[in-house]
């Protein structure tokens, strides 16, 4: 049995954790969630008590980011090098879910403690996209 040390990577280099299929499915879920959220924001959210124009703008931003990140994950899943990258796709997917999900929770339930979480999702998304450029 071997024990990890300071040079052991967090995820093994030849990991099968990230697969094109996983990224494709994450992209589909993210894009579909964004579309549903956008439709709900246009039709049902306005009628909820306490929803302001700023809340609707934040909701629309969350929906758009979910759709765009879902589409990006479709493209990443088809890339010969990045479709199995251990960081880029998962960072975009996780960051997208955290970013859009925390905004939705802030708008719907006024969970103020999620305010600082939203930028962390954005940082992970950005880091994922920067990784694609390296």
Image (spheres, helix red, strand yellow):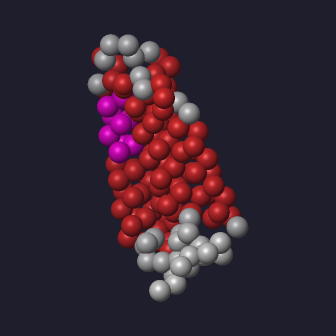
Identify which residue, 13 or 103, lies in the foreground. 13
* Magenta residue span: 33-42
Q: Is residue 60 above or below residue 8?
A: above
Q: Residue at x 47, y 17 (%)?
A: 53
Can see residue 112?
Answer: yes
Identify which residue, 56 or 94, lies in the foreground. 94
Q: Residue at x 56, y 33 (%)?
A: 116
Q: Is residue 63 above or below residue 108?
A: below
Q: Is residue 105 above or below residue 1?
A: above
Q: Position of residue 66 (x, y in %)?
A: 45, 45
Q: Is residue 104 magenta?
A: no
Q: Position of residue 69 (x, y in %)?
A: 49, 51
Q: Using the rendered view, name the quadrant where residue 119 is placed.
A: top right
Q: Count the marks.
A: 0
Q: Residue at x 63, y 64 (%)?
A: 132
Q: Residue at x 52, y 30 (%)?
A: 115
In screen coordinates, is 46 left or right of 87? left
Q: Position of residue 76 (x, y in %)?
A: 51, 66
Q: Position of residue 72 (x, y in %)?
A: 51, 57
Q: Is residue 34 magenta?
A: yes
Identify which residue, 47 or 50, lies in the foreground. 50
Quadrant placement of the C terminus: bottom right
Can see residue 59?
Answer: no
In screen coordinates, is 29 left or right of 10? left
Question: Which residue of the protein is positioned furthest toward the bottom in this rendering?
Answer: 1
Q: Is residue 105 above or below residue 72?
A: above
Identify the main secondary structure in magenta: helix
């Amino acid at each position: 049995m071997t024990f990890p040390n300071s040079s052991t990577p967090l995820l093994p280099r030849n990991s099968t954790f990230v697969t094109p299929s996983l990224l494709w499915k994450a992209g589909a879920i993210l894009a579909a969630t964004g579309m549903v959220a956008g439709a709900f924001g246009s039709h049902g959210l306005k009628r909820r008590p306490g929803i302001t124009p700023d809340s609707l703008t934040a909701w629309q931003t969350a929906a758009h980011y979910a759709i765009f990140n879902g589409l990006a994950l479709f493209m990443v899943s088809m890339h010969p090098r990045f479709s199995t990258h251990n960081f880029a796709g998962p960072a975009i997917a996780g960051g997208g879910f955290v970013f859009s999900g925390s905004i939705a929770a802030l708008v719907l339930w006024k969970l103020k403690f999620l305010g600082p979480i939203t930028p962390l999702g954005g940082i992970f998304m950005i880091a994922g996209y920067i990784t694609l450029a390296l």
